[in-house]
Image (cartoon, grey):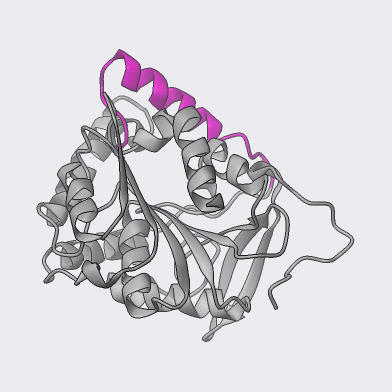
Amino acid sequence: MSDTRPHNEPVITSYAHAPTRTVNAGGFAYAFRELGPQGGVPVVFFVHLAATLDNWDPRIIDPIAKGRHVIAFDQRGVGASTGQVPDSVEAMADDAYTFITALGFDKIDVFSFSLGGFIAQALAVKHPELVRKLILTGTGPRGGKDIDKVAGTTYWDMLRATLTRSDPKEFLFFNRNTTGKAAARAFVNRLKERTADRDTNIKVRAFRTQLKAIKKWGRSSPDDLSQLAQPTLIANGDNDRMVPSVLSEDLHRRIKDSELVIFPNAGHGGIFQYHQQFAPLAVEFLAR
């Protein structure tokens, strides 16, 4: 079932207008949105910690969807997807495999950010035949230095955000200088462009389970990423406080022939701060 839309529907190329659908697989209903022209290998988007379908930056998704079939989805127990969040990244990768194969795909390109990048790596290690190309942003390898400290950073920044009545992502994703603050506000506003059919916010219990899975991932022994033969693009800001920027360099060393892009004066959300530079890079990489 690689064409999941009614045939008479016009092609949607704006994420803000992509309808939310569900597919039943493995006893759970997975919520997803798709856009862009049907056919060919789809690009599946793997989202970050605490995020739902509403957390993708339209300035990243829309340029890719101009020429590619794009699918974003809620992991099990997140947003509008049913079930409970699993407490390991590997189990999340199993769920992603269940979801992707339920849609009828046997080959995908992956766009991932942060926790989504952990899941994407686990998926590619376990099912190398499924993944054709990998984009890993704001992320790091299994067993990577200080990944297990993500929870502490997250809770601290959530507190700071509460005290200043702002979105935690403004602290977690961006530098707190003039450039970073402006980029943060612009990003948060872009996430509000979709006004209808918004997703359900993640529940506190689900969020805590994701943090537990991240800690476990950080304390596990590394995967052998030298076996990954997929063309891989790695990107981050130079000052990532959540998943330290050195881990992007670590991934680059471990994955043969991978490409690395580090944006200056940027944090965890470097790809969103530099969307005008990064989106065309991603489009070109995927089109090769």
Q: Is residue 67 left or right of residue 119?
A: right
Q: Position of residue 233 (x, y in %)?
A: 37, 50
The residue closer to the viewer here, 141 or 211, is 141
Asked where in the image residue 155 lies, by quadrant, the reply is top left
Q: Is residue 129 left or right of residue 102?
A: left
Give, as a single range, the part of the protein colored magenta. 173-196
Q: Is residue 101 above or below residue 247?
A: below
Q: Position of residue 18 (x, y in %)?
A: 69, 51
The residue closer to the viewer here, 117 or 206, is 117
Q: Is residue 219 visible?
A: yes
Please identify the residue farthest to the bottom as the structure is shown. Answer: 26
Q: Position of residue 224 (x, y in %)?
A: 19, 72
Q: Is residue 253 left or right of residue 26?
A: left
Residue at horizontal 20 percent and vertical 41 percent from the top? 245
Residue at horizontal 54 percent and vertical 47 percent from the top? 54
Residue at horizontal 59 percent and vertical 76 percent from the top? 105
Q: Is residue 243 visible?
A: no
Asked where in the image residue 213 lies, by quadrant, the reply is bottom left
Q: Is residue 36 above or below residue 169?
A: below
Specify whether residue 66 is painted magenta: no
